[in-house]
Amino acid sequence: MPELTGATALQLILALGLLNVWLFRAKVATPYRGGGAQSLREEFRAYGLPHWFFVLVGSLKLGSALALIAGMWFPVLTPVAAVVVLALMCGALAMHMKVGDAALKSLPAFMMLLVSATLVVTS
C-alpha cells in the first residue's frame, strides 16, 4: 500500500466522493441537486443537457475517480485525472448558475474543484 500523505488523502477523498455521487446517490434526492431535481439524471435534464452528455460526464467522473485511486500506485495518472475533474467541476458550477441555484447547491462542486486544483498544483 502506498504511503498515506496529504496528497493521497485528497486523492481518496475526491475519488470516493465521485464514486459516492455516481454509484450510490445517483437516484437519491439531495439538497445539492440543481434546478430542484430529485436524481442525477433529472438534474442533467434541468440543465437542458441531452442524455448522451449525462453518460459522457458520468463516464469521465467514474474514470477519473478510478484513475485517482490508481494514481496512488501510478502517480502519472493523478494530475491528468485531477485536470479532468477540475474541468468538470467548472462545468458543474456553470450549470448551477445557469438554472439560478442558490450558492449552497454549488458547494460540493466548489469543494471538489478546490481539491482537484490542489492535486493539480501538488502533483
Image (cartoon, grey):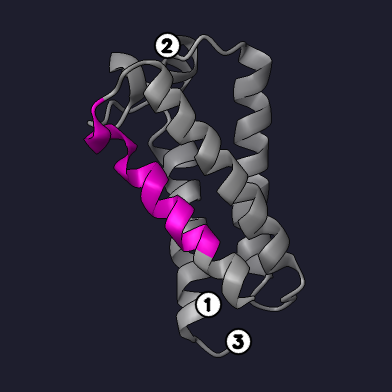
Q: Which residues are magenta?
A: 102-117
Position of residue 8 measured from the top left corner of the image (x, y, whole percent): 53, 77
Please say if 93 is above or below 101.
below
Q: According to the image, label 1 marks what residue? A: 8
In front: label 3 or label 2 = 2
Position of residue 106 measured from the top left corner of the image (x, y, whole percent): 33, 37
Are dots 3 and 1 in contact, CB under 8 Å? yes
Q: Residue at x 38, y 24 (%)?
A: 97
The amino acid type found where label 1 is placed reads Thr
Position of residue 59 measured from the top left corner of the image (x, y, whole percent): 67, 37
In front: label 3 or label 1 = 1
Label 1 secondary element: helix
Q: Residue at x 46, y 70 (%)?
A: 10
Q: Is 49 positioned to the left or the right of 24 in the image?
A: right
- Per the model, the C-alpha gap separating discs 3 and 2 is 41 Å
Label 3 secondary element: loop
Please tell me how crowded label 1 is: few (under 14), some (14-19), or many (20+) other residues with Cα within 10 Å. Answer: many
Q: According to the image, label 2 marks what residue? A: 46
- Any magenta on residue 73? no
Q: Is 99 positioned to the left or the right of 14 in the image?
A: left
